[in-house]
Structures are given as C-alpha cells and as structure tokens.
Image (tube, rainbow, N blue to C red):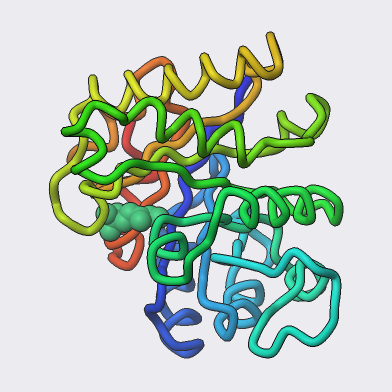
C-alpha cells in the first residue's frame, strides 16, 4: 500500500560529467526495479542525470526549491524550473538547510505546499539533535516539525508527501540509529500523522536517513514503519546498488 523508496541525496557532490558516468554504471547494475529509486542531485547536474537515466524507472530529484513561482529571489530555483528539467521529487527541509540556512517549519511548509501544487513529490525531512534526544525533548521536536510541515495540507495531498526521519547525530557520522530507535521514531511520526489525517497516515511513506549503507539497509528497511531510506554518503558509491537491492 505504501511506496517503498530508496533515495540518494548527493548533497554538494559530483559534477555533471561525474553524474553521467556514475549513473551509466549504476543503471547497468540496477536492472528492473521493484521499488522507487531516485537520486537527488545538485541543480547543475539535473539535466545530465535526467539524460543518463532516460528509458529506466530511476527518478531524479532536487535537494531544495523556492516556494514562490518566480520573482526577485537571486540564486533561487522554482518548482516549475525543476519540473521542466525532468525532476519528479524534491527534498525539503533537510537538517543541513535548517541549520546552515535557517530554514524554519513555516518555510518548509510553504515549500511542501508549492511542490504539491505543481505535482512534485516532496520528501520532507525532520530530525533531532543529540542534545535534544539526551534532554528528552525528542518527540516534542519531531511533533512540532511534522505538525508545522503539514499545516494547511489536506488529506488527499498529505498522502503524496514522503517523510524522512533523519536524526542529526546519525548523518554523516557513521553512527546509525539502531533498528529499534529508527522504528520507534518512524512509528511516532505515523502516530502524529494519524492524529492529523486518520487512516491516511497508513498511506504515507516514511523513510529513515542517517548512515544507511549496504550492511544495515536490510534490517532497517524490514522494520514495520520504515518504508525506505534517504541515503547520503553511500549513494555516491557503486555499492549503492546493494543498498537498493538489500533483500
Ligand atoms: P549519510 O547517509 O551520509 O549519513 O547522510 C544522510 C542524509 O543526510 C541524507 O539526506
């Protein structure tokens, strides 16, 4: 019933040339897909990436977008621009954007709504710092991010949103959340979504992100409330094929 999704987030890595050659190899290795597989690439790699995966089911995503359709926003990219370039998914509110570029739940919400309006699949990120976890405010933090991110979104649209739970202490650190920690929080997110949307919460895909690799993917992905992964570092390596084919 829920989409199973393995998404790579390249962050600020790979030039267009590197994109073309990496995806050519990965595409040959991947073969037929039984789940949604996508790469969220830097803006300047999008055209090369879309070209490289033509004729396959691999999808190309972006890592951010602006919430306005057009206007005087120097350095920004609109949802329409992404769509025209062949993008189908967009990461919104990654913790790196929240912490380095001061993105707020309100801004995240505007972007998610805009993405839905134009028909892009938003991957809305949430996650706590180690300090918040240790102080015991973990669930409050996540609840605030989810309720804020989904504000004003009707149930029919809510089921198109993909949520990515990425504990900040597990990102790029090699410290993966245990299967139980990840499941506990993804189940909690579904509970909050259930309070907001009732049964529709069962249709919303929730991904785990934070040091996912070919060794831990299988046990994480087999947890009942984890519907896939948002993969950083390991999506830049040929072994990403094994993350996708973790079974
Ligand atoms: P790593 O897989 O490198 O920990 O990154 C996770 C992430 O931030 C994906 O969005």
Residue sitting at 23 percent across and 20 percent down? 180
Q: Residue 245 location in percent, x, y?
A: 37, 41
The residue positioned farthest toward the top in the image shown: 199
In the image, residue 113 sits, relative to residue 225, either above or below, namely: below
Left or right for 55, reference 211: right
Ligand 1 shows up in the quarter that is bottom left
Q: Residue 98 location in percent, x, y?
A: 45, 60
Residue nearer the viewer, 122 or 1: 122
Residue nearer the viewer, 7 or 136: 136
Tell me if residue 232 can be seen.
yes
Image-quadrant location for residue 51: bottom right
Tell me if residue 239 can be seen.
no
Q: Residue 106 location in percent, x, y?
A: 64, 51
Looking at the rendered structure, the number of numbered marks drawn on it comes to: 0
Residue nearer the viewer, 219 or 52: 219
Residue sitting at 61 percent across and 24 percent down? 2
Name the image quarter holding the N terminus. Answer: top right
Name the image quarter holding the C terminus. Answer: top left
Q: Residue 86 location in percent, x, y?
A: 74, 69
Residue sitting at 32 percent across and 30 percent down? 138
In the image, residue 144 sits, relative to residue 194, either above or below, namely: below
Image-quadrant location for residue 48: bottom right
Residue sitting at 48 percent across and 73 percent down? 24
In the image, residue 90 sits, relative to residue 158, either above or below, namely: below
């Amino acid at each position: 019933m829920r989409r199973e999704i393995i998404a790579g987030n390249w962050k600020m890595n790979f030039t267009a040339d590197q994109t073309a050659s990496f995806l050519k190899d990965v595409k040959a290795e991947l073969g037929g897909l039984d789940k949604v597989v996508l790469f969220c690439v830097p803006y300047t790699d999008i055209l090369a990436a879309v070209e490289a995966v033509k004729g396959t089911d691999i999808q190309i995503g972006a890592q951010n977008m602006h919430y306005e359709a057009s206007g005087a926003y120097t350095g920004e990219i609109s949802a329409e621009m992404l769509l025209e370039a062949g993008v189908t998914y967009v990461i919104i509110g990654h913790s790196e954007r929240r912490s380095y570029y001061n993105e707020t739940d309100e801004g995240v919400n505007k972007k998610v709504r805009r993405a839905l309006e134009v028909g892009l699949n938003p991957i809305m990120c949430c996650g706590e710092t180690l300090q918040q976890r240790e102080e015991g405010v973990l669930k409050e933090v996540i609840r605030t991010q989810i309720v804020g991110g989904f504000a004003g979104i009707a149930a029919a649209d809510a089921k198109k949103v993909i949520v990515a739970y990425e504990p900040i202490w597990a990102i790029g650190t090699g410290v993966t959340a245990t299967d139980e920690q990840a499941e506990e929080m993804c189940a909690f997110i579904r509970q909050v979504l259930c309070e907001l949307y009732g049964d529709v919460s069962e249709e919303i895909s929730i991904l785990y992100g934070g040091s996912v690799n070919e060794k831990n993917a299988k046990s994480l992905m087999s947890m009942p409330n984890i519907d896939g992964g948002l993969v950083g570092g390991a999506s830049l390596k040929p072994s990403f094929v094994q993350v996708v084919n973790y079974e």
